[in-house]
Protein backbone atom coordinates (compact mmCIF):
# COMPACT_ATOMS: atom_id res chain seq x y z
CA UNK A 1 0.00 0.00 0.00
CA UNK A 2 1.30 3.44 -0.87
CA UNK A 3 1.75 5.28 2.41
CA UNK A 4 -0.13 8.51 2.59
CA UNK A 5 -1.37 9.38 6.00
CA UNK A 6 -3.38 12.46 5.17
CA UNK A 7 -5.13 12.78 1.89
CA UNK A 8 -7.61 15.33 3.12
CA UNK A 9 -8.77 17.40 0.19
CA UNK A 10 -11.26 19.64 1.95
CA UNK A 11 -10.64 23.38 1.70
CA UNK A 12 -8.80 24.74 4.65
CA UNK A 13 -8.76 28.32 5.79
CA UNK A 14 -5.40 30.05 5.49
CA UNK A 15 -3.74 29.46 8.85
CA UNK A 16 -1.99 32.84 8.91
CA UNK A 17 -5.27 34.65 8.31
CA UNK A 18 -6.96 32.59 11.04
CA UNK A 19 -4.20 33.42 13.52
CA UNK A 20 -4.38 37.11 12.62
CA UNK A 21 -8.13 37.11 12.90
CA UNK A 22 -8.12 35.47 16.33
CA UNK A 23 -5.19 37.40 17.81
CA UNK A 24 -7.27 40.30 19.04
CA UNK A 25 -8.81 40.87 22.44
CA UNK A 26 -11.75 38.53 23.01
CA UNK A 27 -14.92 39.58 24.82
CA UNK A 28 -16.96 36.42 24.28
CA UNK A 29 -17.41 35.08 27.82
CA UNK A 30 -17.05 35.60 31.55
CA UNK A 31 -13.39 34.56 31.41
CA UNK A 32 -12.47 37.24 28.91
CA UNK A 33 -14.11 39.74 31.26
CA UNK A 34 -11.83 38.44 34.03
CA UNK A 35 -8.90 39.03 31.67
CA UNK A 36 -9.79 42.23 29.83
CA UNK A 37 -6.25 42.54 28.47
CA UNK A 38 -6.32 39.05 26.91
CA UNK A 39 -4.76 38.60 23.47
CA UNK A 40 -7.44 36.28 22.13
CA UNK A 41 -5.07 33.31 21.91
CA UNK A 42 -2.45 31.76 24.15
CA UNK A 43 -0.26 29.43 22.09
CA UNK A 44 3.32 28.45 21.35
CA UNK A 45 5.23 26.22 18.92
CA UNK A 46 4.47 26.23 15.20
CA UNK A 47 1.16 26.43 13.35
CA UNK A 48 2.91 24.41 10.64
CA UNK A 49 3.62 21.57 13.07
CA UNK A 50 2.45 17.97 12.58
CA UNK A 51 1.26 17.55 16.14
CA UNK A 52 -1.17 19.64 18.19
CA UNK A 53 -0.87 19.45 21.97
CA UNK A 54 -4.16 20.40 23.58
CA UNK A 55 -4.36 21.22 27.27
CA UNK A 56 -7.20 22.53 29.40
CA UNK A 57 -6.67 26.20 30.17
CA UNK A 58 -3.90 28.65 31.07
CA UNK A 59 -2.81 28.87 34.70
CA UNK A 60 -1.08 31.78 36.46
CA UNK A 61 2.29 31.38 34.71
CA UNK A 62 0.68 30.97 31.29
CA UNK A 63 -1.48 34.06 31.78
CA UNK A 64 1.51 36.06 32.97
CA UNK A 65 3.72 34.95 30.07
CA UNK A 66 1.05 34.70 27.34
CA UNK A 67 2.14 31.15 26.41
CA UNK A 68 0.60 27.76 27.22
CA UNK A 69 2.21 25.01 29.28
CA UNK A 70 5.10 27.07 30.60
CA UNK A 71 4.48 26.45 34.32
CA UNK A 72 5.05 23.21 36.29
CA UNK A 73 2.64 21.20 34.08
CA UNK A 74 4.40 22.49 30.99
CA UNK A 75 7.81 21.54 32.36
CA UNK A 76 6.51 18.07 33.10
CA UNK A 77 5.05 17.86 29.59
CA UNK A 78 8.40 18.89 28.03
CA UNK A 79 9.92 15.82 29.69
CA UNK A 80 7.20 13.66 28.12
CA UNK A 81 7.81 15.30 24.75
CA UNK A 82 11.46 14.33 24.80
CA UNK A 83 10.49 10.74 25.65
CA UNK A 84 8.10 10.88 22.67
CA UNK A 85 10.98 12.18 20.52
CA UNK A 86 9.12 15.33 19.61
CA UNK A 87 10.51 18.84 19.49
CA UNK A 88 7.83 21.18 20.83
CA UNK A 89 9.27 24.22 19.06
CA UNK A 90 9.24 22.72 15.54
CA UNK A 91 6.91 19.70 15.49
CA UNK A 92 4.09 21.00 17.67
CA UNK A 93 1.44 23.62 18.07
CA UNK A 94 0.48 23.93 21.77
CA UNK A 95 -2.65 25.53 23.14
CA UNK A 96 -5.70 24.90 25.32
CA UNK A 97 -9.41 24.33 24.81
CA UNK A 98 -10.03 27.67 26.50
CA UNK A 99 -7.78 30.67 25.98
CA UNK A 100 -8.35 32.61 29.20
CA UNK A 101 -7.58 31.41 32.72
CA UNK A 102 -10.72 30.09 34.44
CA UNK A 103 -10.80 31.42 37.98
CA UNK A 104 -13.23 31.60 40.82
CA UNK A 105 -13.24 34.05 43.68
CA UNK A 106 -12.75 32.32 47.04
CA UNK A 107 -13.07 35.42 49.18
CA UNK A 108 -12.96 39.05 48.10
CA UNK A 109 -9.74 39.61 46.16
CA UNK A 110 -8.59 35.98 46.43
CA UNK A 111 -8.91 33.88 43.28
CA UNK A 112 -8.15 30.26 42.55
CA UNK A 113 -7.86 28.19 39.37
CA UNK A 114 -11.13 26.64 38.23
CA UNK A 115 -12.15 24.24 35.47
CA UNK A 116 -13.82 25.87 32.45
CA UNK A 117 -17.59 25.32 32.42
CA UNK A 118 -19.66 24.33 29.40
CA UNK A 119 -20.61 27.94 28.60
CA UNK A 120 -16.97 29.01 28.59
CA UNK A 121 -15.94 26.01 26.50
CA UNK A 122 -18.82 26.64 24.10
CA UNK A 123 -17.88 30.29 23.69
CA UNK A 124 -14.19 29.61 23.15
CA UNK A 125 -13.28 26.21 21.74
CA UNK A 126 -15.31 26.08 18.47
CA UNK A 127 -14.38 29.64 17.49
CA UNK A 128 -10.75 29.55 18.47
CA UNK A 129 -8.78 26.34 18.98
CA UNK A 130 -11.02 24.20 16.77
CA UNK A 131 -10.83 26.73 13.93
CA UNK A 132 -7.03 26.65 14.18
CA UNK A 133 -6.85 22.83 14.26
CA UNK A 134 -9.01 22.68 11.12
CA UNK A 135 -6.77 25.17 9.34
CA UNK A 136 -3.37 23.75 10.34
CA UNK A 137 -1.84 22.75 7.00
CA UNK A 138 0.33 19.85 8.19
CA UNK A 139 -1.62 18.54 11.17
CA UNK A 140 -1.27 14.77 11.54
CA UNK A 141 -2.15 13.94 15.15
CA UNK A 142 -3.54 15.60 18.25
CA UNK A 143 -2.44 14.77 21.79
CA UNK A 144 -4.88 15.75 24.51
CA UNK A 145 -3.72 16.36 28.07
CA UNK A 146 -6.36 15.55 30.65
CA UNK A 147 -10.07 14.85 30.47
CA UNK A 148 -11.43 18.33 29.86
CA UNK A 149 -9.38 18.56 26.65
CA UNK A 150 -10.22 15.01 25.56
CA UNK A 151 -13.96 15.35 26.30
CA UNK A 152 -14.13 18.65 24.44
CA UNK A 153 -12.44 17.29 21.33
CA UNK A 154 -14.21 13.96 21.33
CA UNK A 155 -17.64 15.27 22.31
CA UNK A 156 -18.04 12.52 24.91
CA UNK A 157 -17.03 12.12 28.56
CA UNK A 158 -13.41 10.95 28.77
CA UNK A 159 -11.63 9.43 31.74
CA UNK A 160 -8.37 7.77 32.77
CA UNK A 161 -10.05 4.37 32.78
CA UNK A 162 -11.58 4.61 29.33
CA UNK A 163 -9.27 6.91 27.37
CA UNK A 164 -5.73 7.00 28.80
CA UNK A 165 -3.11 5.98 26.22
CA UNK A 166 -5.66 5.29 23.49
CA UNK A 167 -6.36 6.63 20.00
CA UNK A 168 -9.71 8.11 18.98
CA UNK A 169 -11.25 9.98 16.08
CA UNK A 170 -13.62 12.90 16.30
CA UNK A 171 -16.12 14.27 13.79
CA UNK A 172 -14.84 17.70 14.74
CA UNK A 173 -11.44 17.04 13.14
CA UNK A 174 -12.07 14.12 10.80
CA UNK A 175 -9.09 11.99 9.79
CA UNK A 176 -6.85 13.40 12.51
CA UNK A 177 -6.21 10.70 15.14
CA UNK A 178 -6.37 11.88 18.73
CA UNK A 179 -4.11 10.31 21.37
CA UNK A 180 -5.30 10.86 24.94
CA UNK A 181 -2.90 11.33 27.84
CA UNK A 182 -3.48 12.23 31.47
CA UNK A 183 -2.90 15.85 32.42
CA UNK A 184 0.63 16.50 33.73
CA UNK A 185 -0.89 17.88 36.94
CA UNK A 186 -2.35 14.41 37.62
CA UNK A 187 1.19 13.11 37.97
CA UNK A 188 2.58 16.19 39.72
CA UNK A 189 -0.21 16.43 42.29
CA UNK A 190 0.31 12.97 43.72
CA UNK A 191 3.21 11.18 42.08
CA UNK A 192 3.31 7.39 42.25
CA UNK A 193 5.29 4.62 40.64
CA UNK A 194 2.08 3.18 39.13
CA UNK A 195 1.14 6.47 37.48
CA UNK A 196 4.66 6.97 36.12
CA UNK A 197 4.81 3.43 34.77
CA UNK A 198 1.42 3.79 33.06
CA UNK A 199 2.44 7.12 31.57
CA UNK A 200 5.77 5.81 30.29
CA UNK A 201 3.97 2.86 28.73
CA UNK A 202 1.59 5.22 26.93
CA UNK A 203 4.41 7.44 25.70
CA UNK A 204 6.11 4.30 24.38
CA UNK A 205 2.87 3.34 22.58
CA UNK A 206 2.72 6.77 20.96
CA UNK A 207 6.33 6.31 19.82
CA UNK A 208 5.68 2.88 18.47
CA UNK A 209 2.38 3.65 16.76
CA UNK A 210 3.03 7.13 15.42
CA UNK A 211 6.67 8.18 15.58
CA UNK A 212 8.32 4.89 14.60
CA UNK A 213 5.64 3.23 12.52
CA UNK A 214 3.32 5.77 10.94
CA UNK A 215 1.40 3.18 9.03
CA UNK A 216 -1.14 0.49 9.80
CA UNK A 217 -2.28 1.40 13.29
CA UNK A 218 -2.92 5.08 12.59
CA UNK A 219 -4.50 4.41 9.22
CA UNK A 220 -6.81 1.90 10.86
CA UNK A 221 -7.86 4.50 13.36
CA UNK A 222 -8.83 7.05 10.74
CA UNK A 223 -10.34 4.43 8.45
CA UNK A 224 -7.88 4.89 5.59
CA UNK A 225 -6.21 1.51 5.78
CA UNK A 226 -7.35 -0.15 2.60
CA UNK A 227 -4.36 -2.47 2.31
N1 LIG B 1 -2.48 23.39 32.22
C1 LIG B 1 -3.00 23.33 30.99
O1 LIG B 1 -3.85 22.49 30.68
N2 LIG B 1 -2.62 24.23 30.10
C2 LIG B 1 -1.71 25.16 30.36
O2 LIG B 1 -1.40 25.93 29.49
C3 LIG B 1 -1.16 25.17 31.66
C4 LIG B 1 -1.55 24.29 32.58
Image: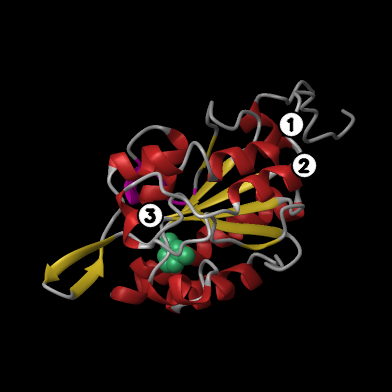
The answer to whether the residues at label 3 and label 1 have Cβ atoms under 8 Å apart is no
Residues in magenta, as a range: 158-165
State the image coordinates of residue 33 (x, y, percent, origin top left).
33, 56
Which is more foreground, mark 3 or mark 1? 3
Residue 142 is inside the magenta segment: no
**Vertical order, 119 against 201 (above or below):** above
Reading the image, the residue beneath label 1 is 12
Task: Name the residue at 64% across, 64% down.
Answer: 84
Which quadrant holds residue 57? Answer: bottom left
Sequence-wise first label, 2 or 3: 3
Q: Position of residue 217 (x, y in %)?
A: 67, 38
Left or right of 29: which side holds 169?
A: right
* Image height of 133 relative to 143, above or below: above
**Mark 3: which secondary structure?**
helix
Q: Nearer the viewer, mark 2 or mark 3?
A: 3
Tell which quarter ligand 1 is in.
Answer: bottom left
> Sequence-wise, which precedes: disc 3 or disc 1?
1
Q: Residue at x 36, y 33 (%)?
A: 156
Please indicate whether residue 10 sits to the left or right of residue 148 in the image. right
Residue 198 is at least partly visible in this image: no
Quadrant of image for the N terminus: top right
Tag 2, which secondary structure? loop
Whole-Å distance between the Cαs marked 3 and 1? 28 Å
Find disc 2 in the rendering and name its residue.
137
Cβ–Cβ under 8 Å for marks 2 and 1: yes
Query: Mark 3 highlights which residue?
Result: 32
Amino acid sequence: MAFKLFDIVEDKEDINEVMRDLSTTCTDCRLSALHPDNRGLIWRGSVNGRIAIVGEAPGDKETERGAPLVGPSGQEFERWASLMKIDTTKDCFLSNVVQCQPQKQLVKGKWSQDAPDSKELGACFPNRLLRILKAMPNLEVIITLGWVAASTLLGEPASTKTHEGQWFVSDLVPKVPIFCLVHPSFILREPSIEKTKALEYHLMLFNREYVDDRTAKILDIVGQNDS
